[in-house]
Image: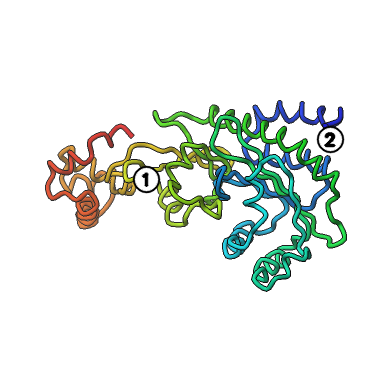
Amino acid sequence: MTHPDTVTLAGLGQLSAQALTLGTEAFAQAMWDWLRSQIRHDRAALVTSGPAEPGYFDAHFLGFPDTAATLASWESVAHLDDVTPRLLSPPLQARRQDRRMPDLFDEKYRPLREHLERHGIEHVIAIAVPVVGEPRVMMFFLIRSTPEDRYADAELQQLESLAPLACNLFTIQRAAMLWRAPMRSAEPAVAIANAQGQLLQTSSAFMRAMWPDAPPQTNYLPPDCWQALRAGRFWPLPDGRHQLSALAIEADNWLLRVSTGSRAALLSRRERDIALRFAEGASYTRIADETGLAPATVRNHLRNVYLKLEVSHRAGLIAALDGLRQT
């Protein structure tokens, strides 16, 4: 195994400082620039996965013109992937995949070959690095697009040397980013998503709450979930006891938080506002005057609130909204 030279270490010193100050996407770009200076590649991906079964809890991509399309294509062929599972057992061992390797010419692998060809993936070297103290790994994929540009054995050894250093710095950056997150509630931030609902950063708590069974094969939140979060609504989690909420921060990124859930989490912002006013004794007419809505619209909103909260009178509404006034 090779070892980082003095130039590599100098670059790591700068990255160490950036890990404490840069946002998630900016740091990922800085990290890819450093890795590219050490091992030449055309495109790259960093994927956070569970330690036993491959999945996309969060990810960063470099050089992919349409990440969502690439991931959608990958979902359809992931079951044919033999390389990624081998990254996990054992980890810390770099592996290589070439689109034209003999094993892939078996007819059953034809969809996978077509996926690789469609997205210009000729040669890949990859490695999985366990995250210290957490039940997850970071998988690094370095991609070349030219058929004659196969990775050399020495470059696999170099990736085995550099990837653990990169993983440690990503771990520091993630902790620093969540530590700097604005605290507008008692619940800690557990993940960060961009404006498209693509998860850039997750935590073990988020992974356990969001995917208690099988890991996802894309790092995009489900569209209906992301639409609800951006509209200010809570999203109920699979265990039925917790809910997800989102808070907009700088660069059009969003902090995601997990909290104890209730049926009140199903209400929209408008419904919450009207329900709270009504629970405090305001009439339809008064709420209409205060909100600028027609009385019939207020009545319709309250009808929806009653249905969502499964209550039939004001006393039940007050009980269902208990605690919502603090959010």
Q: Residue furthest bottom?
A: 107
Q: In the image, what residue occupies the spot 12% across and 41% down? A: 315
Q: In the image, what residue occupies the spot 42% across and 56% down? A: 224
Point out residue 101 in the picture as x, y percentages from the top left corner: 78, 63
Marker disc for residue 2: 2
Point out residue 298 in the picture as x, y percentages from the top left corner: 23, 52
Quadrant of image for the N terminus: top right
Number of the front mark, 2 or 1: 2
Task: Kindly identify which residue carries mark 1.
Answer: 234
Circle 2: residue type: Thr
- Pick whichever, 152 or 39, lies toward us: 152
- Would residue 238 be found to the left or right of residue 107 on screen? left
Quadrant of image for the C terminus: top left
Marker disc for residue 254: none
Circle 1: residue type: Phe
- Would residue 43 be found to the left or right of residue 5 on screen? left
Point out residue 25 in the picture as x, y percentages from the top left corner: 64, 41
Q: Earlier in the sequence, mark 2 or mark 1?
A: 2
- Would residue 169 be found to the left or right of residue 202 on screen? right
Q: Is residue 104 above or below residue 292?
A: below
- Snapshot quadrant of residue 133: top right
Q: Quick check: can you spot residue 107?
A: yes
- What colouring style does the render use? rainbow
Q: Secondary structure at mark 2?
A: loop
